[in-house]
Amino acid sequence: MSGDGAEIRLGVIMLCHDELPIAARMARVWAEGGAAVVVHVDAKAPAADMAAMRGGLADLPQVLFSPRHSCEWGMFSLVQATQDAAALLLDRFEDLTHVMVVSGSCLPLRPVQDLRAFLALYPRRDFIESVTAADVGWTVGGLNEERFTLRFPFSWRRQRKLFDRHVALQRRLGYRRRIPQGLVPHLGSQWWCLTRATLRAILADPRRAEFDRYFRRVWIPDESYFQTLARRHSQNIESRSLTLAKFDGQGKPYIFYNDHLEMLEQSRCFVARKIWRGAHRLYAHFPHGDAARPQVDEPRPERLDRIVSQAVARRSLGRPGLYMQSRFPLKDRENGKTAAPYAVLQGFSDLFPGFESWLSSRVDADVHGHLFAVHGAEFAGRAPIGPGALSDSAALRDLDPRGFLANLIRITRRMQAWQFSPRDGQEMNWFTATDPNARIFVITGAWAVPLLHSDMPFDDIRRVAAILQRTELAQMEVLNSVWLKAQTQVWALGDFCARPADALRGVLRQLGGDPEAATNLPVMRDVAGMGRFLQRLRNAGLRPQLMGEFPATDIAPAPPAPPAPDPEESSAP
Amino acid sequence: MPRLTRWPIWKRLRRRARRQWLIARALNRARALQPVQNRTGTIRRGDILAFVTLRNELVRLPWFFRHYRQLGVQHFLVVDNASTDGSAEWLAGQPDVSLWRTGASYKEARFGMDWLNALLRRYGSGHWCLTVDPDEFLIYPHHDTRPLQALTDWLDAGEVRSFSAMLLDMYPRGSLVSQPYRSGQDPFEIARWFDPANYTIRKNGEYGNLWIQGGPRCRSFFRDNPQNGPALNKIPLVRWRRSYAYVSSTHMLLPRSLNIVYDEHGGEKASGCLLHAKFLSTFVEKSAEELTRRQHYADSQEYMAYHSGLQDDPDFWCAQSCELQDWRQLEDLGLISKGHWA
């Protein structure tokens, strides 16, 4: 067995419907590479274009034109066109050993001699992708086996509604067509390369009339007719296509452009589909290689495969946490509400006035103040313009708080952490609670600490406390719901104050900091008198529910650091 | 799409009535257009057309035409709103321009949209039509290697009829006046900075379009009343049919399905952006002029805000501004997307 392909006579069936000048050019490439070509031109193509094509190829005796059918996507006419062209090819060129199907927009990437030499290595093999219908997972529209068992009188492209309803109706009625005996439905790419023997056997099958009648009502028969019948007649099927033909996830062939040149060349594929009509550099460059010294190396389309599957994923899944002009997911269809983990710290800054700077020196994160504060976003360092050029304006933030949050997290390299409290805007509570990227740490009732130190009239304090408690209770309801996806940790104020170091150690560990850095605690506000304060609220008719246990007589848990008597910070709500 | 059909019928009827009213109004207002140079006979099947309204933009025109010719726009249909700086003469001399002139009010013509709707209906049907201002420069994924025709062919193959390109305000570092713009120069040599991620997006229930605001103008001039800030969502590229109409600038269209340029199930559709070269040295004079003409949206509220803002410190630049590199950068930032057009 030699490798130069001299004993291989290749026939090519070329199916064209538009862009005939390019198709004519491709026919010439095939013919000059030593292949016999039969061109099928869709009957709908303009007569003038057709005449020009015939004229342009008149000097090539090995290029013939087969009877024209009017082809519609997904219909049997395409199979008929292929059958007629194949019959013509086999009759006129008796020495053909292989027949390949290509389209007018297929571009041979390597010299035809390469392909012939490659085929010479496996002279009896049929290269046809052929997968049992039960096992394909890749068809668009979700119809696999049902392609063979339902009827499809309506066009999917033009009469989609009727098509869908008709399918639904047949499913409901439990209608099933009988598959002819001896056929096992297979699907695969319509760009195959069969040996003469197999193709002849398919065309001359004694039951061909029966099969044709059956496939006439199968959906997209060009992807199943030869693929199924090859299983019946071939001794040696290699289930793959020699043509690089990718689909873009929307059921449309993937298109190649000038900028794919290098990648196409590296892929070492024999034929690529589909090439944009204006990709002149590709048409000029390919087929590329030395026709005199054919190479028989295998195609290696992995890199292209990767690019295509990335593109498909981009179209169907998108980038997590991105909200933009062409991606605006509905609630819970986000495929990732935010782009990266982030932390929401509630109550810490009420208890520790210097908490922001304490935390930011201990974890690798941007620690902001109250991003959702009513008066505006408090970015780290109180910059008027935050990451991504986000403004600290409350009005701008509240126009689209979800976008604000998602933008902030997506645009920054480091983890984002911010303070939160019931005094802030609560619009994003459900969003953060249902986001797996959120780490929410809450000291419930901590909002009472600034009130304890406030010198407002007690009536006002009581009213404010009532509002804040109601707000925080509503938030707790969200955090306790069954839809919770965030990682949460909640302490009551009393429990937290009993062992602040332990709790802070846990926070640092979860945020990727060194837990031991918690030994040096931030300065804590004095909570002595909290018990008495809560009792006064009770006496005023309010029932504090979130602070945990504080004895009504004044023995507060001993603060680990000397109490900090600083009345500044955001104590006045 | 089936969801759309479940909308209450009266809303659909109302939108239809509005569309027909827009078209009728456009045809009526278009009577004020006087043809100066009609070369529409040279338009061939499949050509990509650009539709532009302008007034006194001579200094910008050379780069504008260079940009769009390079992308592969084959014919420009221009309405000149009584320019006095020689724009009309310059345009009439271009082989691929059809020019109309009118002295009618820009504001009365719904900021020029009536004129363009009429021209789109008359000459745009069956073509991919790009409707842009002279300071808007379309870029899209792969625009450096693939002409506009490649994009429109691909959209055709996917049966997509409209393409989104949000407006991205570009600005220089430092004051506008200190870096004068010369005719024929690439405006983005000067205005090469933009805001990367401060855009707010809301959905408009009536028309189905997204309403995008934000960027440097919003954070500088509209921080307390952002609702009045300029809209940045644009759908400038449409495969036109006679029954279509732009509703408000190129922000949205009717029928409503043309506005669904975004994916709602987590995926990304392809989109580009219009680089907005408004903030150049030319802007200062322009804003003074527009202020007296009062021909812009909402009584030129925007221009009033600019003018007061520009007088003390005309600088949008901040430490978070990004310097424009190429479309890949915009793609990474998530301002545009290549969708599955890779």
Image (cartoon, rainbow, N blue to C red):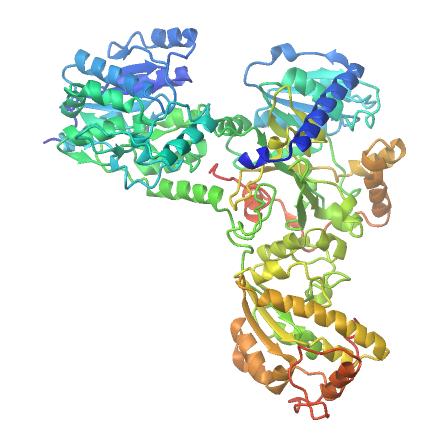
Query: Is A9 on the left-hand or right-hand side of A486?
Result: left
A509 is higher (above) or lower (below) than B119:
below
Looking at this view, is B195 or A535 the one in front?
A: A535
* Relative to A83, A284 lies left or right: right
Residue A85 in picture, x, y percent from top left: 26, 15
Residue B22 lies, with reference to residue A561, above or below; the image says above
Describe residue A290's horizontal placement relative to residue A460 as left or right.
Answer: left
Residue A524 x/y as whole percent? 69, 83
Residue at the extreme left:
A1
**At 33% across and 30% down in the image, what residue appears?**
A150
Q: Residue at x 55, y 15 (%)?
A: B45
Q: Residue at x 33, y 43 (%)?
A: A302
The part of the image, by quadrant, that contains residue A557 is bottom right
Q: Which one is nearer the viewer's eye here, A242 or A169?
A: A169
User: Farthest front residue?
Assistant: A173
Tell me the quarter of the picture where residue A558 sits.
Answer: bottom right
Q: Is residue B16 left or right of residue A307?
A: right
For image coordinates 21% across by 28% down, the residue present is A180
Quarter of the picture holding the N terminus of chain B? top right
Q: Give the number of marks.
A: 0
Residue A500 or B46: which is nearer the viewer? A500
